Image (cartoon, helix red, strand yellow):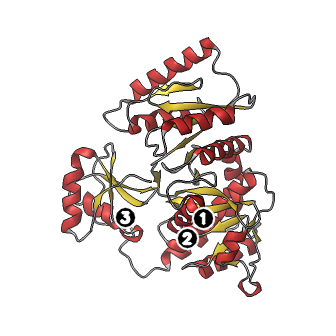
Amino acid sequence: MNDKIPVKRIMGEVFYQIAEAIETGKLDKKVKIGLTTFGCEVGIEQWVAAAEDISRNREDFEVVLIGPKLTTTLLQFEADTEDEAHHKMETMLDFGMIDACITTHYTYPIGVASVGKMMAPGKGKDFYLATTSGTAALNRSAAMVMNAIYGIITAKTMGIIDPKVGILNVAGARKTEKKLKQLKKQGYPIHFAQSLRPESGCIMRGNDVVAGTPDVLVHDSLTGNITMKMFATFMTGGFFESAGAGYGPGIGQHYDRLAMVISRASGHIVVQQAILYAVQLVKGNLVKVAQNEFALAKKAGLEQIVEELTKERDDESYRPGTGVVSPLGEPVNQGISGIDIMELEKAVRVVWSEGIYAESGMGCTGPVLMVNEKKFDQALMILRENGYLVYEEIECV
């Protein structure tokens, strides 16, 4: 928790505004979707108009804004900064005041990654990109196996009973295929897609992506992020996102917040589609579906498969060391970028060895090492002295 934003004050403000909303009749039993408005690059008025338009005369859900005070008929919870908006969002999610939230520039813990939703231009069919931000595991193939599970969870929550899974032809694809088929043989129900290229099997080529061949397209998060951005901004020449429903919900084995990510460059339609995506995930009970799927996958040996993949690496540098002990924990609120995902845990221990507490995380542009803002300059210097080409985390676009 940011030490500049005391949790008691956040909770007090939130509860006060909830009480006021109940008294004025603005809060009822509808599904509540939060939307933070800081960082919008296309004009906050576009996002507000999108939220107003999509929720007008809807009896099943309403949108709650979190951010600077605006002129709108929507319920608002004020925040002065993006950090404060995120903390309010998390408090409201944890206490059930909102059912899901859509935000930007949000860092998931390691083990959590988000599943984006896109419409294939070839057929007009929805499909899910697993994953588009975050990191499911530090080993690439292990992460892609977990991404497949995350994608299946999302697709099932959205009403696809037997989603067809395809694996993008990137590094680690064949190893991922082998392990997923092992998982299926051991009892976890996976239905594989068939590439338009018959010799490729469930390994998807570029034309499969455009055609939307699979229901779930599996790849590493950074490739997924690029794929989503290319689809979303194709019709605008890369200037803003005009297609899809954003980068989706963060999913992990021990993660129960329905926190969804969109780009700061999301246009009117993307914001609306992200809101509808969130509503459907709430109604489909994403958290319960995830619990059921993880239980099935674990029974079929998921944890053993992930452990095997992790041990296959010869490079020991990313594994936890035995000689470095974590310093006393403290709030971490500033990110350091420029560290390769495979070296992230080693970098954390390098900072620990100098008495500074740090945590690994994943921003929407890649891995980050999180430290307390008061220790930022010192941590940056330590990492640079140890050969890391690091810099302050940049804002997402």
Q: Secondary structure at mark 1?
A: helix
* Residue located 50% across and 80% down the image: 312
- Residue 174 shown left or right of residue 346 in the figure: right
Task: Find disc 2 in the rendering and name its residue.
Answer: 142
Q: Real-space Cα distance between discs 3 and 2?
A: 16 Å
- Residue 381 shown left or right of residue 336 in the figure: left
* Residue located 57% across and 54% down the image: 247
The answer to whether residue 33 of the structure is visible from this angle is: no
Q: Is residue 161 above or below residue 144?
A: above
Q: Quadrant of residue 68?
A: top left
Q: Real-space Cα distance between discs 3 and 1?
A: 19 Å
The C terminus lies in which quarter of the figure?
bottom left
Contact? badges 3 and 2 (CB < 8 Å):
no
* Residue located 60% across and 32% down the image: 98
Q: Which mark is residue 345?
A: 3
Residue 23: percent from left, percent from top: 60, 11
The answer to which of marks 3 and 1 sits earlier in the sequence is 1
Q: Quadrant of residue 352?
A: bottom left
Q: Is residue 15 above or below residue 50?
A: above
Q: Is residue 96 above or below residue 321?
A: above
- Residue 112 shown left or right of residue 178 in the figure: left
- Residue 200 shown left or right of residue 45 in the figure: right
Q: Mark 1: which amino acid?
A: Met
How crowded pointer 1 is (Cα within 10 Å; few <14, some 14-19, many 20+) is rated as many
Residue 38: percent from left, percent from top: 44, 39
Residue 1: percent from left, percent from top: 38, 39
The answer to whether residue 255 of the structure is visible from this angle is: yes
How many marks on residues?
Answer: 3
Q: Mark 2: which amino acid?
A: Ala
Contact? badges 2 and 1 (CB < 8 Å):
yes
Task: Find disc 1 in the rendering and name its residue.
Answer: 146
